[in-house]
Image (cartoon, rainbow, N blue to C red):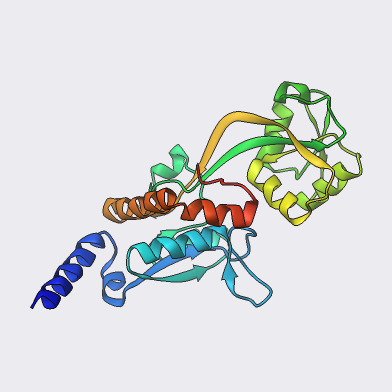
Amino acid sequence: MKKLLKSSLLTLASFALLTGANAKTLENGVLKIATEGTYSPYSYHDKNDALTGYDVEVAREVAKKLNLKAEFVEAPWDAMLAAFDAGKADAVFNQVSVTDERKKKYDYAQPYTVVHGAIITHKDNDDIKSFDDLKGKKNADSATSNWAKVAASYGAQNVTVDSFSKSMELLVSKRVDTVVRDNIVFYDFIKQRPGAPVKIAAEGSDTDYTAPIVQKGNTELAGQISKAIEELKNEGKLAEISIRYFGKDVSR
């Protein structure tokens, strides 16, 4: 009788926990998660073609906390959001920045990544210690990058490249002075190439956050995802995942 009562209570608790998810999620016990699958190190396929990455692992741990199976819906950024808007997924885990504009369309759960703008320089460069020192310096980035705009706002001259890896090649060979990007991209780069002669010379004071999004008005699911993320932080699980991918805890 006690076992039956306990089982019934757990079933009721699980139902209460997931009232914010749609009926299909409740019925199948699956949390459908939209992600790109081509965005290393956050969401990508490894050499065995298994979906992995920082965001993917966080999403799987959140689903476990909700007693649901994580099922991923993969598509490029625009198509991914279109699929989510069409109700083909319950949440998005894909480094979605928290912005006022997006808050008008979606509800956010608690952030799981904290990002700072960073100036990356050659390790021999001691001239740059703040964003104000960018004036007149050569910065490598793509023509449409938001970070290129940030660098330009401080007076840097942009040297156009088509990828972050090309930017870093120019920096390592001292053909440019800086690469302005977020600090997490640098941590990933240095983890892949620990001997590269580069460093973070300065970080910006502005902080950017990335968080899961759910459909607008689905505050219960957002709340339960937030609770799961908070528990994962307190247990040290988010830090463990973060350090595995970046060598640092980027969750706080």
Residue 83, can we see it?
no
List x then y, in percent, for residue 195: 83, 50
Above or below for 140 versus 69: above
Image quadrant for the N terminus? bottom left
Above or below for 67 versus 238: below
Q: Quadrant of residue 17?
A: bottom left
Q: Quadrant of residue 208?
A: top right
User: Would residue 175 be found to the left or right of residue 36 on screen?
Assistant: right
Residue 212, can we see it?
yes
- The residue depicted at 77 percent of the width and 26 percent of the height is 134
Nearest the camera: 226 or 98?
A: 226
- The residue depicted at 87 percent of the width and 44 percent of the height is 172
User: Would residue 132 be found to the left or right of residue 29 on screen?
Assistant: right
List x then y, in percent, for residue 22: 28, 66
Q: Quadrant of residue 44?
A: bottom right
- The residue depicted at 26 percent of the width and 59 percent of the height is 20
Nearest the camera: 64 or 15?
A: 64
- The residue depicted at 47 percent of the width and 64 percent of the height is 34
List x then y, in percent, for residue 218: 29, 54
List x then y, in percent, for residue 18: 26, 62
Nearest the camera: 92 or 60?
A: 60
